[in-house]
Amino acid sequence: MSLLSPAVAPVVAPAPTIRPTRAVVDLAAIRHNLEFIRRRIGSRCGIMAVVKADGYGHGMVDVAREAARWGVQGIAVATVDEALTLRESKGLEEMPILVAGPSFPDDADLLQRAGISVTIGTIELLRQHLAIARRRGVAPRLHLKVDTGMGRYGFRPDRLTFLDLFGPMPQALEGLMTHFSVSDSLNQDDVDYTISQRQRFEFVARRVHKFGFRPVVHAANSGAVLHHEESHYELVRPGVLLYGAHPDPSAGGLPLKQAMTLATRIVAIHDRPAGASISYGRRYVMPEHGRLGILPIGYGDGLPRCYGDGGQVLIRGRRVPIVGRVCMDQTIVDLSKLPEGRVGDEVVLYGSQGGERISLEEVARIARTIPYEITCQLGGRVPRIVIDSHETSSPAPAGGLEV
């Protein structure tokens, strides 16, 4: 019979089941963390919620909508496509949105028509936006980026001779901004460096004001929100704080709520004898006869490959060690001291279960990285489930950039 023969009835595949590995995002935690930030900065300073990189892996649109409902003054993203996605999302049609990263001159017309604020770090981009604005007869929304020591994108403080270009359209200069490189660190050298960045930025701000411009001045990222009150100015740009993690993985103790819980279920259990090699590279050898659980999650989902070197998970409210290297699609845990563990048991990789908790900071320390990367690298095949663990009755109304 030919392989193409129609004589055999086709097999109908069953409907796919929901994957047991999932990331649960709690909007109530986002609100709680916004309240923490508000208390930290006071009532006279505005908040621009940073939701780039798909909301640090939490879901950009859902987080942005919740932040807008709560009452932030603006939303910041990194790319043009992120900004346009938000602008086209229900509830964000009028929300001030800033592309905080570099963009191409070719995108200027599209961004202006969508009412998107744009970070300007090159003279070519500035000229393009002003030229298009003159043709349209509508002022653009431009934020001048000053490189005070990040060494990345922006104008040097001593090279702002082009401010006269704004003369015919002064309202185009909506914002003046910089970015701190070590504001999360309390090492004295780093504190001094952030202070020097702030002083260079304030020098530029005075010069801009002397020219008669009154842009919204903003600089503070999460680290500066915590440690550098003098840099709060008129607007702050919190990122990782919004999601409930400290920007420094070696620190902690903040009254934040981690917004994401990463969980899966035990899919299989096997016994392995003493001396058996476990996972790739034979990095782990069974010291004695034991019982291993297989989790359907791996570095293909964004779990760090090196997390087997000291990482733990929560099962039945208890900590259980990961053994061997994390594989692309599977992770192995040692159930030898949890004999009651069963196939189907829920497993929390970070988040809370029972009275135990595994924080993003802990995962980052073991993986030798930062909390930002842990959630940002979470793969697209991990379903995001958005919940609200409790409702608030009267969120503050959303505001504009005029703070």
Image (spheres, helix red, strand yellow):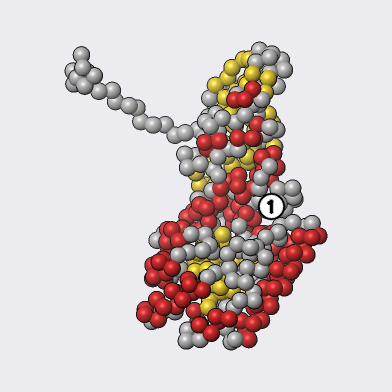
Name the residue furthest right.
Answer: 188
Q: As rendered, which of 91 and 101 lies closer to the eye?
A: 101
* Residue in the image at 62% along x and 29% along y: 325
* Residue in the image at 49% along x and 69% along y: 118
Q: Secondary structure at mark 1?
A: loop
Q: Whole-percent x and y of residue 100? A: 54, 64
Residue 351 seen in render: yes
Residue 396 seen in render: no
Residue 335 sits above or below residue 301 on the image? above
The quadrant in which the N terminus is found is top left
Q: As rendered, which of 94 and 362 lies closer to the eye?
A: 362
Could you tell whether 44 is left or right of 51 in the image? right
Q: Whole-percent x and y of residue 202? A: 68, 76
Q: Whole-percent x and y of residue 215? A: 57, 78
The quadrant in which the C terminus is found is bottom right
Residue type at numbered disc 1: His
Q: As rendered, which of 16 and 388 lies closer to the eye?
A: 16
* Residue in the image at 68% along x and 14% along y: 275
Q: Residues within 10 Å of mark 1 (few under 14, many from 20)?
A: many
In the rendered image, which quarter is residue 238 located in?
A: bottom right
In the rendered image, which quarter is residue 359 located in?
A: top right
Could you tell whether 306 is left or right of 126 in the image? right
Q: Whole-percent x and y of residue 276? A: 65, 15
* Residue in the image at 56% along x and 51% along y: 56
Residue 249 sits above or below residue 41 on the image? above
Residue under pointer 1: 246
